[in-house]
Image (tube, rainbow, N blue to C red):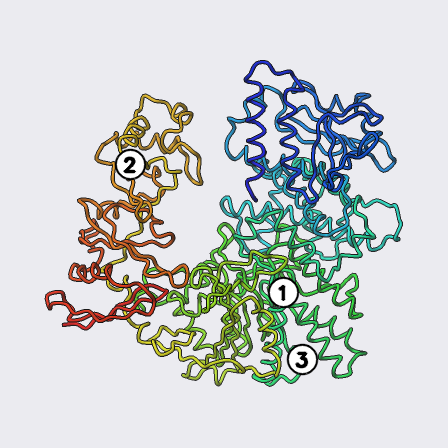
Amino acid sequence: MSDSGRELLDTYLARMVEVRATGAATSETSYYGALENLLNGVGRELRPRVIANGQIRNQGAGHPDFGLYAQSQIRDGAPVGGAGAIPERGVVEVKGLTEETWFTAETTQISQYWAHYGLVLVSNYRSFLLIGRDPNGQPRRLEAFALTESDSAFWSLRQSEEDQLNQLGHALQDYLRRALSYLAPLTRAEDLAWLLASYARDALRRIEASADLPALANVRSGLEQALGLRFDDAKGEHFFRSTLVQTLFYGIFSAWVQWARGQAPNATDRFDWHAAGWTLSVPMVRTLFEQVATPTRLGPLGLVEILDWTGDALNRVDRNAFFEGFDEGRAVQYFYEPFLAHFDPALRKQLGVWYTPPEIVHYMVERVDLALREELGIENGLADPSVLILDPCCGTGSFLVEALRVIETRLRSQGEDALVAHDLSTAARERLFGFELMPAPFVVAHWQIGMLLAHAGAPLVSDQRAAVYLTNALTGWQDTEGPVEQLLLPELQPERDAAERVKRADPIIVILGNPPYNAFAGISPQEEEGLVEPYKAGLRSVWGIRKYNLDELYTRFLRVAERRIVERSNRGIICFISSYSYLSDPSFVVVRRHLLEGFDRIWIDSLNGDSRETGKRTPTGEPDPSVFSTPFNREGIKLGTAVGMFIRRGPTEGQSDAHAQVRYRQFWGGHKRQDLVASLEGGDLNAGFAATTPTAANRYNFRPLGPASDYDNWPDLIALAEAEPFSGLAEMRRGSPIDTDRDRLAGRMQRYLDPTISFGTLKTEQIGPVGDASRFDPEAARTRVLLRENYSQQRIIRYSLLPLDTRYAYHTKVRPIWNEPRPEFFSAARDGNRFLVSRMMAERPQEGLPALPVTASLSQRQLRATCLACPLVVPICRSRRVCGLRASQMPILMLIQRLPKSPGFTRWLLFPRRVGFRKIRLRFSVAGLAYHCQPT
């Protein structure tokens, strides 16, 4: 979520305090300007824009303090005749801070405004109340919001904790957006998704304000059991609470859609959210909804009021107009995507959840269907009743829906129209399986499958459901000993048992999908955390890879799929779109060996679009966006991606000593999705692909190596080092221990480390690291450093923040004054030692050599991310391990600084024998610098 809500609140409070500080302010009218700026700040964010104009003329009901006008009412700038335009979005009545909003809402004046304008926003600057009409046309209190309960608390609000101010800012912004949009017509799914997401955020804030959630303890434990995971630490707790809120709101929305579809076009009946649970067709969601939505639980959580507002919003929808433009078959784009983007974008990003564009889905499903027929000899492909398909991270069900479309097309082409409905329904219930962890996409998956079946004439009846299960796809694959654990929520037992049957017994031969990209802390049980251990075997001892990252979540899904096809089914296909880091990254060398040994054929479609490796540029310099960049999600993702298809023909060939045949091709530019679909023409699995030769010598690289393959075998900077280079110092305290002036820094840190000065004084004066940050308690940190050391002039060091930007820093090893003080690096930096600084990977094409000699302690982000430093004078560490580069190589590295840095530049350099190398060959590329040394 953006910080605009906090900015609006800060600006509003600052102006209110300024007016009060004059001592000449009236209780009400002097503060009009601050409120007008707040309302217009919110109104600017709406489409169409809403404008608050003060002191409008008498239009037959007195003089409201503000009128709320839509942009369309003032578009041409010419004044409307007569008494002027009626404010389309209602009016605002303001009272002084000491007056209560609930009381002023009952006055005759407010009643007159309501009768004439239809909507009144009443405020006393610290609280707000919306007055509108009930279904019978009578005045009714609608939504309310309060910053504080009293005027005295309001004036001290600016001294609140950062988290509280952030929460209040976003809550105030959400409330005023809804208030200023209340009378706007609701006809589009995107607008309704935003509105429900706004209520959902309010619900989440109220749940998070409950300290221990005793009313939901049983639900929490039941979900942990049923989903096979744990809700650990703050992130896991947030995931649990977000899951509950999504269940409530998707349950209500899907129930409303079903209810609305059953109403006559001009019916005036009203939707009752309390009865939503009775209309939910998916047992798992119905059970969760009923567990959370019971009055005994909603009451303590304070959600009844918010769900009443939600029900009112759904009853304001123009149903005829809404359903003219809303296609349940595209509910993902029309509702789920905007809802999740507005409700919890941080969770979505942390989980790496991205909607797969339809072209990618179509391509992958068609390729799998073709491979089944050509490689595995299954003539009917996906339509064959023996083919069991699993999407272990099905999200909104796109791959399963596309598979059903392919099956339907195949059956109809064979003249089996009479059996299509039966076969499609059977496939959806018995052999197309989906696993999903998040309830919102889980509901949409059932929704989309149900709509496709209904359009095909094969609707699921009340006692039937698609084989899509709410479960953790990364656990539960191994048989357990002893009695089956009984769930705390018995209603969830059938869901858990059905998912485990698929994992342990059903002969899956196709696994496809778009696995999440990121590891998410707080919800991974021990079984899941050990999944990638086979991919780490020998990384250090055999391959000499000291640093590796296999935490991307897709790696775990790849291991689950590989194990299922290779070790259990012994025959089948995996087809994933994922990050393309596994194609050549050294960390994935064991992953690639596993795939080569377990499968017979591998096809790789590299879709590029990586922000670091290529800078999202084609080789000719044109834009190369992510394939996930679509009109519904223009941002896309930063990672380069690839479609990988892995085929195991059977036990005989799969157990041979030969490695799989690997074929590779790549797509560039802004039309990659269309080019990918066009490549399906002709029905040739190998068309456009080139064979590659992964071997142990090139770390089983899946990419073509080309004529410069020797270059990949040259040692890199880390290989030349005796041990791992150092990372720089990580400050992350808003620059408080850093300054361009040594004396100014010394005075500031002397004061910070003076035990006679209170922490409150330092915070007021903003001296030293006194601001809250993630996992950083500034007062506790200061107390700790005062107990361990006094101020020392010797701790002021030269600090290279960025290239050509050297400052001074006060360095202490006492954590957590610095986020990462790096005592080992600090020891190596003493006595004027020099460092050669580089980074692990290029960030953009043709960037030259990212290397820099530094004579000071340096920042972790000296050269942006993944910065590493090699000391020129080799110190002895406390662990008696020699760190840094070999001393004999220092002259070589210093000469490198004088050479051209353009990619493709190559040179042999001669050195005297005492250096240790007779000659060394240097080659520069977009990925950095490599050496080829000829020993003396």
Q: Quadrant of the N terminus?
A: top right
**Amino acid at pointer 2:** Tyr
Instruction: Give the mark nearest the N terminus, 3 or 1.
Output: 3
What residue is shown at x 32% (from left), y 36% (from top)?
739
Reply above or below: 418 against 642.
below
In this rendering, position of residue 532 left or right of residue 743: right
Within the image, what quadrant is residue 655 found in?
A: bottom left
Amino acid at circle 1: Gly
Is there a contact, CB below 8 Å, between mark 2 and mark 1? no
Q: Position of residue 114 (x, y in %)?
A: 81, 29
Indicate the secondary structure of the residue bearing disc 2.
Answer: strand
Kindly report the distance in space between the C-alpha atoms of the residues bearing marks 3 and 2.
70 Å
> Residue 819 at what x, y percent from top left?
36, 42
Q: Crowding at label 3, few (<14), some or many (≥20) Cα neighbours within 10 Å?
A: some
Q: Which mark is residue 810?
A: 2
Relative image position of residue 355 (x, y in whole percent): 60, 60
Asked if residue 242 is positioned above or below residue 30 in the image, the reply reads below
Residue 450 location (% of width, % of height): 74, 63
Along the line of sight, which residue is nearer the eye, 240 or 661? 661
Looking at the figure, which quarter contains the C terminus?
bottom left
> Residue under circle 3?
384
Q: Residue furthest top?
A: 24
As rendered, which of 537 and 28 lies closer to the eye? 28
Left/right placement of residue 720 relative to residue 48 reads left
